[in-house]
């Protein structure tokens, strides 16, 4: 039980820090949109219209499925940001490209961390025990 | 089921608890009591979500040299709202519930209207923020009382602690709004 608790806490701590990094990147990109004269998407409708990342439904899922979904979201964002770095460079907007490059690096590091959690077999087993 | 193309498809086998249900809790609170508290706290979570996103939007969009202080305040206030959301969501989980966590659940429980997606002048934006804080604070006072009646001391304490923060931030907004420069500045803008 102690191990399970320890592992659970490690994942939770990581997820808390990771969501804050995503939010910071979101703030930085929103500031850039405003600098460019636009309005960042800021309601569920405007976000859903533009987002390539799929939203998880409201139910509570097991940890493995939840992390799978997180990793999928990171993957989607990483691919899209790489494309947009090329776009910004093509349009000679080095400020935006630089911002995206910094964000991409953070997202890749967090995706890697999630992948390592998922490779851990105890994650699966402890979930089965908890599932009852 | 309605069409939900924006949702990730997850096999039902992975569902541990369905949204809007309350399971057992380890806190020795009666299921009926826990259910009432979960519903009250999910309304808190939903209201915080909406207000957080609104305050953060205003932080993104506030502009001009005089607005720098306002922008910094809004950024910090949004962070405080987000911390409260985390604390209350964790309490919902401890009570055996699933915290409101998506647009559907939030709309179901929210005590606030969402601002439309456009950009508005600073003064009316701050007025709507203040209105949101006031609505939440009034509801929390009722729920502090509810938690007291139901004998959940910890939830009462959690709400009281954060209520103080809500009231303090509302007070700062009220002071910005009392400032005439903010008034004339927003009036001169189109």
Image (tube, coloured by chain):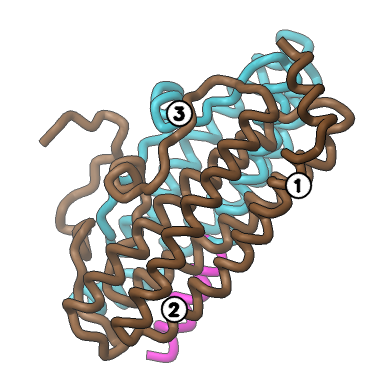
Chain colours: A cyan, B brown
Is the stretch drawn in magenta largely helix, strand or loop? helix
Quick check: marks 3 and 1 in contact, CB under 8 Å? no
Instruction: From the viewer's perspective, tell me whether residue B26 is left or right of residue A82.
Output: left
Residue furthest left in the image: B1
- Packing grade of label 3 (10 A; few <14, some 14-19, many >=20) is few
In terms of secondary structure, where does tag 2 sit? helix
Q: Secondary structure at mark 1?
A: helix
The question of residue A11 being in magenta is answered with yes
Residue A64: image quadrant is bottom left
Q: CA distance from mark 3 to mark 2?
A: 35 Å
Residue B65, position in %: x, y? Answer: 89, 29
Observer-side mark, 3 or 1, equals 1
* Residues under numbered marks 2 and 1 in contact, where contact means CB atoms less than 8 Å apart: no
Residue name at image x 68 percent, y 33 percent: B60
Which segment did they paint magenta?
A1-15
Task: Name the residue located 53 percent from the left edge and 51 percent from the top edge.
Answer: B134
In the image, residue B1 sits, relative to residue B190, either above or below, namely: below
Name the disc covering residue B156, or none.
2
Labels 3 and 2 touching (C-beta < 8 A) = no
Neighbour tally class for label 2: few under 14, some 14-19, many 20 plus, Cα within 10 Å: many
Q: Is residue A99 above or below residue B100?
A: above
Q: Is residue B77 left or right of residue A126?
A: right
Residue B30 % position (x, y): 20, 85
**Rendering quarter of residue A36:** top right
Residue beneath disc 3: A47
Label 1 crowd (10 A; few <14 / some 14-19 / many >=20):
few
């Amino acid at each position: 039980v102690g191990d399970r608790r320890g592992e659970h806490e490690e994942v939770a701590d990581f997820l808390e820090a990771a969501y804050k990094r995503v939010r910071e990147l979101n703030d930085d990109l929103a500031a850039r949109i405003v600098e460019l004269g636009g309005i960042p998407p800021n309601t569920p409708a405007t976000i859903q219209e533009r987002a390539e990342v799929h939203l998880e439904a409201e139910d509570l899922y097991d940890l493995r499925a939840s992390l799978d979904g997180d990793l999928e979201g990171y993957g989607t964002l990483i691919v899209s940001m790489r494309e947009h770095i090329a776009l910004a460079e093509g349009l000679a907007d080095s400020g935006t490209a630089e911002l995206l490059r910094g964000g991409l690096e953070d997202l890749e590091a967090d995706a890697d961390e999630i992948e390592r959690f998922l490779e851990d077999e105890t994650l699966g087993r402890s979930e089965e025990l908890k599932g009852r | 089921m309605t069409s939900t193309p924006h949702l990730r498809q997850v096999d039902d086998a992975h569902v541990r608890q369905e949204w809007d249900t309350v399971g057992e809790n380890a806190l020795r609170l009666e299921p009926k009591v826990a259910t009432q508290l979960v519903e009250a706290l999910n309304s808190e979570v939903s209201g915080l979500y909406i207000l957080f996103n609104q305050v953060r939007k205003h932080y993104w969009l506030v502009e001009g040299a005089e607005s720098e202080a306002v922008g910094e305040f809004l950024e910090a206030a949004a962070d405080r709202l987000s911390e409260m959301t985390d604390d209350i969501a964790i309490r919902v989980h401890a009570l055996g519930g699933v915290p409101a966590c998506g647009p559907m659940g939030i709309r179901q429980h929210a005590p606030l209207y969402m601002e439309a997606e456009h950009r508005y002048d600073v003064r009316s934006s701050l007025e709507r923020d203040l209105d949101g804080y006031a609505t939440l604070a009034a509801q929390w006072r009722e729920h502090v009382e509810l938690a007291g009646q139901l004998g959940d001391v910890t939830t009462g304490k959690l709400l009281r602690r954060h209520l103080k923060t809500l009231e303090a931030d509302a007070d700062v907004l009220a002071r910005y709004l009392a400032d005439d420069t903010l008034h004339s500045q927003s009036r001169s803008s189109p």
